[in-house]
Image: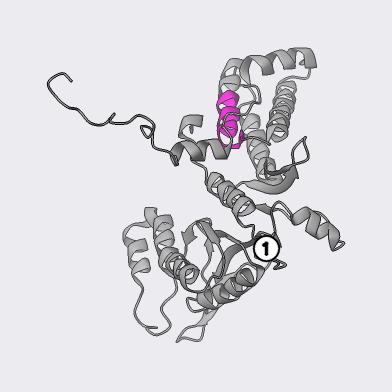
Amino acid sequence: MRTPEKYESLSLKTYEMIRYCVRHFQSGAAAANSSRCWVAIGNLLRQQPRARASGGVQFAQLRHGLLHHPPVAPHRPHQPPIAVLLAVLAPNRVSQIANVYLYYVFDLWAQRWRRRAATGDMIIVRYADGIVVGFEHEHDARRFLDMMRTRLEEFSLTLHPEKTRLIEFGRYAASNRKRRGLGKPETFTFPGFVFICGVTRQGQFQLKRKTRRDRMRMRLKEIKDELRWRMHQPIPKQGRWLRQVVAGFFNYHAVPTNSRALAAFRCHVTKLWRRSLKRRSQKAAMTWARMEKLANDWLPEPRVLHPWPSQRFAVKHPRWEPYAGIPLVRICAGDGQ
Protein backbone atom coordinates (compact mmCIF):
# COMPACT_ATOMS: atom_id res chain seq x y z
CA MET A 1 0.00 0.00 0.00
CA ARG A 2 1.32 3.42 -0.90
CA THR A 3 1.60 5.80 2.05
CA PRO A 4 1.30 9.60 1.79
CA GLU A 5 5.02 9.95 2.51
CA LYS A 6 5.91 7.70 -0.45
CA TYR A 7 3.30 9.23 -2.75
CA GLU A 8 4.97 9.81 -6.10
CA SER A 9 2.21 10.45 -8.62
CA LEU A 10 2.83 11.64 -12.12
CA SER A 11 -0.08 14.04 -11.68
CA LEU A 12 2.34 16.12 -9.56
CA LYS A 13 4.61 16.60 -12.57
CA THR A 14 1.62 17.41 -14.77
CA TYR A 15 0.31 19.85 -12.18
CA GLU A 16 3.68 21.59 -11.99
CA MET A 17 3.92 21.69 -15.79
CA ILE A 18 0.54 23.43 -16.12
CA ARG A 19 1.33 25.68 -13.18
CA TYR A 20 4.61 26.70 -14.80
CA CYS A 21 2.82 27.35 -18.07
CA VAL A 22 0.28 29.55 -16.32
CA ARG A 23 2.88 31.56 -14.42
CA HIS A 24 5.73 31.87 -16.89
CA PHE A 25 4.17 31.59 -20.33
CA GLN A 26 3.29 35.28 -20.20
CA SER A 27 4.90 37.86 -22.45
CA GLY A 28 4.70 41.62 -22.75
CA ALA A 29 4.65 41.40 -26.52
CA ALA A 30 1.55 42.30 -28.45
CA ALA A 31 1.25 38.84 -29.96
CA ALA A 32 -2.18 37.29 -29.74
CA ASN A 33 -0.81 34.15 -28.11
CA SER A 34 1.34 35.85 -25.51
CA SER A 35 -1.21 35.37 -22.71
CA ARG A 36 -2.21 31.82 -23.53
CA CYS A 37 -0.97 28.38 -22.62
CA TRP A 38 -1.50 25.72 -25.24
CA VAL A 39 -1.53 22.09 -24.17
CA ALA A 40 -1.32 19.12 -26.53
CA ILE A 41 -2.63 15.83 -25.21
CA GLY A 42 -1.67 12.68 -27.10
CA ASN A 43 -2.32 8.99 -26.67
CA LEU A 44 -0.67 6.31 -28.75
CA LEU A 45 -3.28 3.94 -30.08
CA ARG A 46 -1.79 1.24 -32.28
CA GLN A 47 0.40 0.55 -35.23
CA GLN A 48 -0.65 1.02 -38.75
CA PRO A 49 -1.39 -2.28 -40.56
CA ARG A 50 1.68 -3.69 -42.23
CA ALA A 51 1.46 -6.35 -44.95
CA ARG A 52 3.49 -9.48 -44.41
CA ALA A 53 5.13 -11.58 -47.05
CA SER A 54 2.28 -14.09 -46.73
CA GLY A 55 -0.28 -11.41 -47.56
CA GLY A 56 -1.71 -11.06 -44.05
CA VAL A 57 -2.01 -7.90 -41.95
CA GLN A 58 -0.33 -7.48 -38.57
CA PHE A 59 -1.57 -5.13 -35.85
CA ALA A 60 0.24 -4.16 -32.68
CA GLN A 61 -1.15 -2.19 -29.79
CA LEU A 62 0.57 0.03 -27.26
CA ARG A 63 -1.63 0.71 -24.27
CA HIS A 64 -0.99 1.15 -20.55
CA GLY A 65 2.75 0.77 -21.02
CA LEU A 66 2.49 -2.63 -22.75
CA LEU A 67 3.96 -3.21 -26.18
CA HIS A 68 2.65 -6.30 -27.96
CA HIS A 69 4.53 -7.39 -31.07
CA PRO A 70 6.81 -4.35 -31.54
CA PRO A 71 7.15 -3.21 -35.13
CA VAL A 72 9.87 -4.30 -37.47
CA ALA A 73 12.00 -1.49 -38.82
CA PRO A 74 10.85 -0.51 -42.32
CA HIS A 75 14.36 -0.64 -43.77
CA ARG A 76 15.00 -4.12 -42.25
CA PRO A 77 11.78 -6.04 -42.73
CA HIS A 78 13.30 -9.50 -42.16
CA GLN A 79 15.34 -8.73 -39.05
CA PRO A 80 13.40 -8.97 -35.74
CA PRO A 81 13.86 -5.97 -33.45
CA ILE A 82 15.62 -6.31 -30.13
CA ALA A 83 12.34 -5.54 -28.28
CA VAL A 84 10.86 -8.81 -29.54
CA LEU A 85 13.84 -10.81 -28.33
CA LEU A 86 13.78 -9.12 -24.94
CA ALA A 87 10.04 -9.70 -24.62
CA VAL A 88 10.56 -13.40 -25.23
CA LEU A 89 13.48 -13.67 -22.83
CA ALA A 90 11.94 -11.48 -20.13
CA PRO A 91 8.13 -11.49 -20.49
CA ASN A 92 7.65 -9.85 -17.07
CA ARG A 93 9.47 -6.71 -18.22
CA VAL A 94 7.39 -5.85 -21.27
CA SER A 95 6.32 -2.50 -19.76
CA GLN A 96 9.96 -1.49 -19.20
CA ILE A 97 10.79 -2.52 -22.75
CA ALA A 98 7.91 -0.41 -24.07
CA ASN A 99 9.16 2.62 -22.14
CA VAL A 100 12.67 2.12 -23.50
CA TYR A 101 11.22 1.81 -26.98
CA LEU A 102 9.26 5.07 -26.65
CA TYR A 103 12.30 6.74 -25.12
CA TYR A 104 14.15 6.36 -28.41
CA VAL A 105 11.07 6.87 -30.59
CA PHE A 106 9.60 9.96 -28.89
CA ASP A 107 11.55 11.33 -25.91
CA LEU A 108 14.89 11.96 -27.60
CA TRP A 109 13.20 13.35 -30.70
CA ALA A 110 10.98 15.69 -28.64
CA GLN A 111 13.97 17.03 -26.69
CA ARG A 112 15.85 17.70 -29.90
CA TRP A 113 12.77 19.42 -31.41
CA ARG A 114 12.47 21.65 -28.36
CA ARG A 115 16.06 22.78 -28.63
CA ARG A 116 16.10 23.36 -32.39
CA ALA A 117 12.57 24.17 -33.60
CA ALA A 118 10.59 25.64 -30.69
CA THR A 119 10.28 29.44 -30.65
CA GLY A 120 8.91 29.63 -27.08
CA ASP A 121 8.90 27.71 -23.84
CA MET A 122 7.88 24.08 -23.98
CA ILE A 123 7.42 21.39 -21.31
CA ILE A 124 6.87 17.66 -21.91
CA VAL A 125 5.43 14.99 -19.59
CA ARG A 126 5.00 11.38 -20.74
CA TYR A 127 3.66 8.36 -18.85
CA ALA A 128 3.64 5.09 -20.81
CA ASP A 129 1.61 5.93 -23.93
CA GLY A 130 0.09 9.16 -22.53
CA ILE A 131 1.72 12.46 -23.50
CA VAL A 132 1.01 16.02 -22.31
CA VAL A 133 3.00 18.90 -23.79
CA GLY A 134 2.71 22.56 -22.80
CA PHE A 135 3.54 25.37 -25.22
CA GLU A 136 3.82 29.12 -25.01
CA HIS A 137 2.75 29.74 -28.62
CA GLU A 138 -0.05 28.14 -30.57
CA HIS A 139 1.94 27.80 -33.78
CA ASP A 140 4.59 25.77 -31.92
CA ALA A 141 1.90 23.43 -30.64
CA ARG A 142 0.41 22.87 -34.09
CA ARG A 143 3.80 22.32 -35.73
CA PHE A 144 4.82 19.88 -33.00
CA LEU A 145 1.56 17.92 -33.32
CA ASP A 146 1.96 17.57 -37.09
CA MET A 147 5.60 16.57 -36.86
CA MET A 148 4.89 14.13 -34.03
CA ARG A 149 2.37 12.33 -36.23
CA THR A 150 4.98 12.09 -38.97
CA ARG A 151 7.58 10.86 -36.51
CA LEU A 152 5.34 8.11 -35.13
CA GLU A 153 4.28 6.99 -38.60
CA GLU A 154 7.92 6.19 -39.34
CA PHE A 155 7.68 3.52 -36.61
CA SER A 156 4.17 2.36 -37.60
CA LEU A 157 2.55 4.10 -34.60
CA THR A 158 -0.50 6.36 -34.69
CA LEU A 159 -2.16 8.80 -32.30
CA HIS A 160 -5.56 8.06 -30.86
CA PRO A 161 -8.01 10.19 -32.91
CA GLU A 162 -10.33 10.90 -29.94
CA LYS A 163 -7.79 11.38 -27.16
CA THR A 164 -5.34 13.52 -29.12
CA ARG A 165 -6.28 17.21 -29.18
CA LEU A 166 -4.94 20.73 -28.81
CA ILE A 167 -6.61 22.87 -26.13
CA GLU A 168 -6.17 26.35 -24.71
CA PHE A 169 -5.45 26.06 -21.02
CA GLY A 170 -4.31 28.49 -18.37
CA ARG A 171 -5.10 31.61 -16.42
CA TYR A 172 -6.63 33.57 -19.28
CA ALA A 173 -8.22 30.66 -21.12
CA ALA A 174 -11.70 31.30 -19.65
CA SER A 175 -11.70 35.03 -20.45
CA ASN A 176 -10.31 34.49 -23.96
CA ARG A 177 -12.91 31.85 -24.79
CA LYS A 178 -15.70 33.98 -23.35
CA ARG A 179 -14.61 36.92 -25.49
CA ARG A 180 -14.77 34.67 -28.56
CA GLY A 181 -18.22 33.41 -27.62
CA LEU A 182 -17.07 29.92 -26.58
CA GLY A 183 -17.79 27.92 -23.45
CA LYS A 184 -15.61 27.00 -20.51
CA PRO A 185 -12.02 25.86 -21.09
CA GLU A 186 -11.65 22.21 -22.01
CA THR A 187 -10.38 19.69 -19.49
CA PHE A 188 -8.05 16.72 -19.88
CA THR A 189 -7.36 13.54 -17.93
CA PHE A 190 -3.87 12.44 -16.92
CA PRO A 191 -3.24 10.03 -15.10
CA GLY A 192 -6.35 9.15 -13.10
CA PHE A 193 -7.23 12.84 -12.55
CA VAL A 194 -9.20 15.41 -14.48
CA PHE A 195 -7.33 18.74 -14.77
CA ILE A 196 -9.71 21.72 -14.69
CA CYS A 197 -9.30 25.48 -15.03
CA GLY A 198 -11.01 26.72 -11.86
CA VAL A 199 -11.08 29.73 -9.57
CA THR A 200 -10.62 30.22 -5.84
CA ARG A 201 -13.10 31.83 -3.49
CA GLN A 202 -11.32 35.12 -4.11
CA GLY A 203 -11.86 34.76 -7.86
CA GLN A 204 -8.23 33.98 -8.73
CA PHE A 205 -7.18 31.24 -11.13
CA GLN A 206 -6.64 27.80 -9.63
CA LEU A 207 -5.71 24.55 -11.31
CA LYS A 208 -8.00 21.86 -9.93
CA ARG A 209 -7.70 18.09 -9.96
CA LYS A 210 -10.63 15.71 -9.63
CA THR A 211 -10.81 11.93 -9.71
CA ARG A 212 -11.99 10.51 -13.01
CA ARG A 213 -15.56 9.24 -12.84
CA ASP A 214 -14.91 6.17 -14.92
CA ARG A 215 -12.02 5.12 -12.69
CA MET A 216 -14.11 5.59 -9.54
CA ARG A 217 -17.01 3.71 -11.08
CA MET A 218 -14.73 0.84 -12.07
CA ARG A 219 -13.24 0.68 -8.57
CA LEU A 220 -16.69 0.64 -6.96
CA LYS A 221 -17.76 -2.19 -9.22
CA GLU A 222 -14.74 -4.21 -8.10
CA ILE A 223 -15.63 -3.54 -4.46
CA LYS A 224 -19.22 -4.60 -5.08
CA ASP A 225 -18.15 -7.91 -6.60
CA GLU A 226 -15.69 -8.55 -3.79
CA LEU A 227 -18.31 -7.77 -1.12
CA ARG A 228 -20.62 -10.32 -2.66
CA TRP A 229 -17.91 -12.93 -2.26
CA ARG A 230 -17.21 -11.80 1.35
CA MET A 231 -20.89 -11.49 2.24
CA HIS A 232 -20.93 -14.11 5.01
CA GLN A 233 -17.61 -13.23 6.57
CA PRO A 234 -17.62 -11.63 10.04
CA ILE A 235 -18.22 -7.91 10.05
CA PRO A 236 -14.83 -7.09 11.66
CA LYS A 237 -13.06 -9.00 8.89
CA GLN A 238 -15.02 -7.14 6.22
CA GLY A 239 -14.33 -3.86 7.99
CA ARG A 240 -10.58 -4.44 8.06
CA TRP A 241 -10.58 -5.22 4.35
CA LEU A 242 -12.69 -2.16 3.47
CA ARG A 243 -10.44 0.02 5.59
CA GLN A 244 -7.44 -1.03 3.52
CA VAL A 245 -9.34 -0.46 0.27
CA VAL A 246 -10.57 3.03 1.20
CA ALA A 247 -7.20 4.02 2.68
CA GLY A 248 -5.43 2.89 -0.49
CA PHE A 249 -7.82 4.97 -2.60
CA PHE A 250 -7.25 8.01 -0.40
CA ASN A 251 -3.48 7.59 -0.47
CA TYR A 252 -3.51 8.31 -4.19
CA HIS A 253 -6.55 10.54 -4.70
CA ALA A 254 -6.54 12.60 -1.48
CA VAL A 255 -5.08 15.70 -3.13
CA PRO A 256 -6.21 19.32 -2.68
CA THR A 257 -9.38 20.33 -4.58
CA ASN A 258 -10.56 16.69 -4.61
CA SER A 259 -12.41 16.50 -1.28
CA ARG A 260 -15.84 15.99 -2.84
CA ALA A 261 -14.71 12.93 -4.77
CA LEU A 262 -13.23 11.43 -1.58
CA ALA A 263 -16.46 11.95 0.34
CA ALA A 264 -18.49 10.52 -2.54
CA PHE A 265 -16.28 7.42 -2.71
CA ARG A 266 -16.65 6.74 1.03
CA CYS A 267 -20.41 7.26 0.82
CA HIS A 268 -20.75 4.81 -2.08
CA VAL A 269 -18.63 2.22 -0.26
CA THR A 270 -20.87 2.57 2.80
CA LYS A 271 -23.98 2.02 0.67
CA LEU A 272 -22.48 -1.06 -0.98
CA TRP A 273 -21.49 -2.47 2.38
CA ARG A 274 -24.97 -1.94 3.82
CA ARG A 275 -26.57 -3.60 0.79
CA SER A 276 -24.26 -6.58 1.16
CA LEU A 277 -25.02 -6.94 4.87
CA LYS A 278 -28.76 -6.74 4.27
CA ARG A 279 -28.55 -9.65 1.83
CA ARG A 280 -27.06 -11.96 4.43
CA SER A 281 -30.51 -12.75 5.76
CA GLN A 282 -34.12 -11.88 5.05
CA LYS A 283 -34.51 -10.75 8.65
CA ALA A 284 -31.42 -8.58 8.71
CA ALA A 285 -32.26 -5.19 10.16
CA MET A 286 -29.37 -3.02 9.06
CA THR A 287 -30.59 0.49 9.85
CA TRP A 288 -28.75 3.59 8.77
CA ALA A 289 -27.93 4.43 12.38
CA ARG A 290 -26.11 1.12 12.83
CA MET A 291 -24.51 1.42 9.39
CA GLU A 292 -23.16 4.87 10.16
CA LYS A 293 -21.64 3.52 13.38
CA LEU A 294 -19.96 0.71 11.44
CA ALA A 295 -18.67 3.15 8.83
CA ASN A 296 -17.26 5.45 11.51
CA ASP A 297 -15.58 2.51 13.23
CA TRP A 298 -13.95 0.98 10.17
CA LEU A 299 -13.79 3.41 7.25
CA PRO A 300 -11.33 6.32 7.37
CA GLU A 301 -12.70 9.82 7.13
CA PRO A 302 -12.17 11.69 3.84
CA ARG A 303 -9.43 14.27 4.26
CA VAL A 304 -6.63 15.67 2.16
CA LEU A 305 -3.43 13.73 2.80
CA HIS A 306 -1.07 15.47 0.41
CA PRO A 307 0.17 19.05 0.42
CA TRP A 308 -0.21 21.39 -2.49
CA PRO A 309 2.09 20.35 -5.35
CA SER A 310 3.86 23.70 -5.19
CA GLN A 311 4.87 23.01 -1.58
CA ARG A 312 6.06 19.48 -2.35
CA PHE A 313 7.94 20.68 -5.43
CA ALA A 314 9.63 23.44 -3.43
CA VAL A 315 10.83 20.91 -0.84
CA LYS A 316 12.16 18.42 -3.40
CA HIS A 317 13.72 21.11 -5.61
CA PRO A 318 14.72 24.04 -3.36
CA ARG A 319 15.84 27.29 -4.96
CA TRP A 320 17.77 28.56 -1.94
CA GLU A 321 21.00 27.62 -0.17
CA PRO A 322 20.53 26.70 3.52
CA TYR A 323 23.68 28.46 4.77
CA ALA A 324 23.66 31.41 2.41
CA GLY A 325 22.92 33.93 5.19
CA ILE A 326 25.51 32.55 7.68
CA PRO A 327 29.03 33.49 6.60
CA LEU A 328 31.91 31.06 7.16
CA VAL A 329 29.57 28.40 8.52
CA ARG A 330 31.26 25.75 6.39
CA ILE A 331 34.82 26.73 7.37
CA CYS A 332 36.49 25.12 10.39
CA ALA A 333 39.61 26.95 11.56
CA GLY A 334 40.76 24.09 13.79
CA ASP A 335 42.35 24.14 17.25
CA GLY A 336 38.95 24.67 18.88
CA GLN A 337 38.40 28.05 17.17
Is 250 included in the stretch rendered in magenta? Answer: yes
The residue lying at 19 percent from left, 28 percent from top is 332
Q: Is residue 32 above or below residue 329?
A: below
Residue 328 percent coordinates (x, y): 28, 31
Task: Tell me: 209 left or right of 203.
Answer: left
Between 55 and 264, the residue placed more toward the observer is 264
Task: Tell me: 320 left or right of 169.
Answer: left
**Overall secondary structure of the magenta section:** helix
Callout 1: few (<14), some (14-19), or many (20+) C-alpha neighbours within 10 Å? some
Element type where label 1 sits in the image: loop
| Colouring of the image | one colour
Q: Which residue is mark 1?
A: 34
Give the residue furthest to the right: 181
Q: Is residue 43 above or below residue 16?
A: below
Q: Quadrant of residue 285?
A: top right
Between 127 and 96, the residue placed more toward the observer is 127
The residue lying at 70 percent from left, 35 percent from top is 261
Point out the image quarter for the C terminus. Answer: top left
Q: Is residue 265 above or below residue 209?
A: above
User: What amino acid type is highlighted by mark number 1?
Assistant: Ser
